[in-house]
C-alpha cells in the first residue's frame, strides 16, 4: 500500500534504518550506505534525491514528521509574512522550535479538503518535480534509481509510484491545480523549496515559475525561503 506520509518522512530525514540516527547527524555516511547497500539502509531520500542540495533538514522539524514539518514551516512563514517584519528580522526573532499549526488553522494536514493522504501525495510529487528541475535525472540516472528502488525494501506500490513519477513529464499545472486552498499553495512551494537548495538557473527558474503559477506574493516567497533556510544545515562531507 502506498503511504505518502512515510515517503515525506523519508524525504525530510527521519531516522534511517541501518544507521540508527537522523540524516542530519550522519548525512554523508547514510548517503554512502544507501549507494553501497540500499537494501540494508532503506534511505529513500538518498536514493531518490541524492545529495545535490548539500543540506539537510535539522532540529525540531525532524521531530514532527514530514507532513507536519511542511505544514509547520509553511504556517510559520505565512505568520511571519503577515507580521510585516522583514524575513531576516522574523527568523532572528524565532525561538528555533518548530511547532505544528494550531488546531483551527487551515494549514493543519487533517483539514485538507481532498483528504490528508491525497494532499501528502501532492507534496511528494512536488518534491520529486523540484529535485528533477536541474535536468540531471536523465535516462541513465532513472535506470540507476529504479534499480536501487527495487533493492531498497520499500513496497511494490511505492516503487511503482516513484517509477511513474520519474518517467512522467513534470506537470506544473497539475501540481498547482492540486493545491486547492491558499494554505496548500504555501505548503506546496515550501515542500518544493525543502527538496532543493537552488544553485542553478534551472532550479531557481523552476521555483520562480512555481511561485508565479501559485500566485504567491514575492514577500511571502522571501519569508518561505528564510524559514526553510533556517532549518537546514550543511551536510557532513
Image: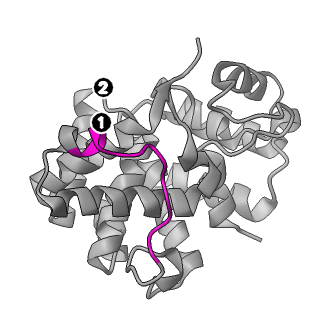
Magenta segment main secondary structure: loop
What crowding class fits label 2: few (fewer than 14 Cα within 10 Å), some (14-19), or many (20 or more)? few
Q: Is residue 186 left or right of residue 71?
A: left
Residue 68: where, in percent of width, then height?
54, 63
- List the residue tagged with mark 2: 199
SS under mark 1 = helix
- At 54% across and 48% down in the image, what residue appears? 61
Query: For residue 204: magenta?
Result: no
Is the C terminus in the top left, top right, bottom left or bottom right quadrant?
A: top right
Q: Is residue 164 above or below residue 153?
A: below
Quick check: marks 1 and 2 in contact, CB under 8 Å?
Answer: yes
Q: What numbered label is drawn on residue 203?
A: 1
Q: Position of residue 25 (x, y in %)?
A: 67, 27
Q: Residue furthest top?
A: 237
In the picture, the quarter occupied by the N terminus is bottom right
Q: Quadrant of residue 155?
A: bottom right
| Residue nearest the viewer, comparing 49 with 174 | 49
Seen in the image, is 193 located left or right of residue 69? left
Amino acid at each position: 500500500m502506498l503511504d505518502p506520509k512515510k515517503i515525506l518522512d523519508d524525504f525530510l530525514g527521519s531516522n534511517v534504518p541501518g544507521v540508527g540516527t537522523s540524516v542530519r547527524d550522519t548525512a554523508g555516511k547514510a548517503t554512502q550506505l544507501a549507494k553501497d547497500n540500499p537494501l540494508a539502509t532503506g534511505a529513500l531520500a538518498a536514493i531518490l534525491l541524492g545529495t545535490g542540495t548539500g543540506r539537510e533538514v535539522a532540529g525540531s522539524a525532524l521531530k514532527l514528521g514530514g507532513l507536519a514539518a511542511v505544514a509547520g514551516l509553511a504556517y510559520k512563514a505565512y505568520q511571519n509574512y503577515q507580521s510585516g517584519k522583514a524575513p531576516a528580522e522574523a527568523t532572528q526573532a524565532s525561538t528555533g522550535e518548530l511547532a505544528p499549526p494550531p488546531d483551527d488553522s487551515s494549514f493543519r494536514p487533517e483539514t485538507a479538503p481532498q483528504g490528508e493522504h491525497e494532499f501528502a501525495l501532492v507534496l511528494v510529487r512536488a518534491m520529486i518535480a523540484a529535485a528533477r528541475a536541474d535536468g540531471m535525472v536523465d535516462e541513465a540516472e532513472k535506470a540507476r534509481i529504479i534499480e536501487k528502488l527495487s533493492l531498497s525494501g520499500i513496497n511494490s506500490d511505492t516503487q511503482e509510484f516513484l517509477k511513474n513519477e520519474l518517467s512522467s513529464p513534470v506537470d506544473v499545472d497539475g501540481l498547482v491545480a492540486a493545491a486547492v486552498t491558499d494554505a496548500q499553495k504555501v505548503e506546496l512551494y515550501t515542500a518544493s523549496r525543502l527538496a532543493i537548495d537552488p544553485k542553478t538557473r534551472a532550479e531557481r527558474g523552476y521555483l520562480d515559475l512555481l511561485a508565479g503559477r501559485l500566485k504567491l506574493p514575492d514577500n511571502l516567497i522571501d519569508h518561505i525561503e528564510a524559514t526553510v533556510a533556517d532549518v537546514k544545515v550543511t551536510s557532513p562531507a
